[in-house]
Amino acid sequence: EAQVTQNPRYLITVTGKKLTVTCSQNMNHEYMSWYRQDPGLGLRQIYYSMNVEVTDKGDVPEGYKVSRKEKRNFPLILESPSPNQTSLYFCASSPGQGATNEQFFGPGTRLTVL
Amino acid sequence: QQPVQSPQAVILREGEDAVINCSSSKALYSVHWYRQKHGEAPVFLMILLKGGEQKGHEKISASFNEKKQQSSLYLTASQLSYSGTYFCGTASNTGNQFYFGTGTSLTVIP
């Protein structure tokens, strides 16, 4: 089944404790992206990747890191999480350029930073 | 560059029609529409491309006015399953970065 998977689905952590949220897609998509969703603010792009080893900042990249060493995986790293990073996170992938193609979303990761 | 959506929320009875608007202060090269049900991930509805090409999956129509930098989503004869939050989205002029609107909550009641 074609899908985007994220792990973990739920995470409660404490300020400053490094964490990684994994994202994997099995559709051979070039474009992958991370979004955070907060009430009243919609979905905001954190980072995106056009292909392996090609990543760039989205609208709200502060406090996050990403890497794209393989086409299928695009992990999101929070080196020192803070409470303002409490949010619902979605990973998405898209064939070709993201702007002109449908994005497929993972199920989301709900992160709480205490 | 975040698109602005209106209305923020709408409540309909089954069978009624609704229009959701999306406007941008920047030039639009494509407009995407997604629907998100409570507790779920956004799901693709439609893409409208500059030049009039439309790509979509469901029986929901939309328009794209490039000059006015606006798009509208039309839901006709609404069903209970149409309930959810609708997001428009647009890409940067390079086609790489993506911006979602703030969303429109649609509730269809019997």
Image (cartoon, rainbow, N blue to C red):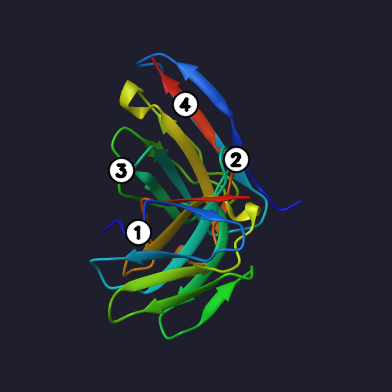
State which chain disc 1 sits on. B
The first of marks 2 and 3 along the sequence is 3
- Determine whether label 4 and label 2 are within 8 Å by CB: no
Residue at screen point 59% across, 59% down: A29
Mark in the foreground, 4 or 1: 1
Location of residue B97 in the rendering, given as x and y in whole percent from the top left corner: 36, 58
State which chain disc 4 sits on. A
Which residue is label 2 attached to? A107
What amino acid is labelled 3 in the image?
Val
Residue at the far bottom in the pictured view: B51
Mark in the foreground, 3 or 1: 1
Q: How crowded is mark 4: few (under 14 residues within 10 Å), some or many (20 or more)?
A: some
Q: Residue A60 carries which label?
A: 3
What amino acid is labelled 4 in the image?
Leu
Nearer-the-camera pick, A57 or B26: B26
In the rendered image, which quarter contains the C terminus of chain A?
A: top left
Residue at screen point 64% across, 52% down: B80
User: Do dots 4 and 1 share one subunit?
Assistant: no
State which chain disc 3 sits on. A
Location of residue A96 in the rendering, given as x and y in whole percent from the top left corner: 53, 67
Which residue is label 4 attached to? A111
User: Do dots 2 and 3 share one subunit?
Assistant: yes
Measure how far apart labels 2 and 3 are at the Cα level: 21 Å
Nearer-the-camera pick, B100 or A104: B100
Which residue is label 1 attached to? B6
The first of marks 4 and 3 along the sequence is 3
Report whether B8 appears left or right of B75: left
Measure how far apart labels 4 and 3 are at the Cα level: 16 Å
Location of residue B61 in the rendering, given as x and y in whole percent from the top left corner: 54, 73
In this rendering, the answer to whether B109 lies above or below A36 is below
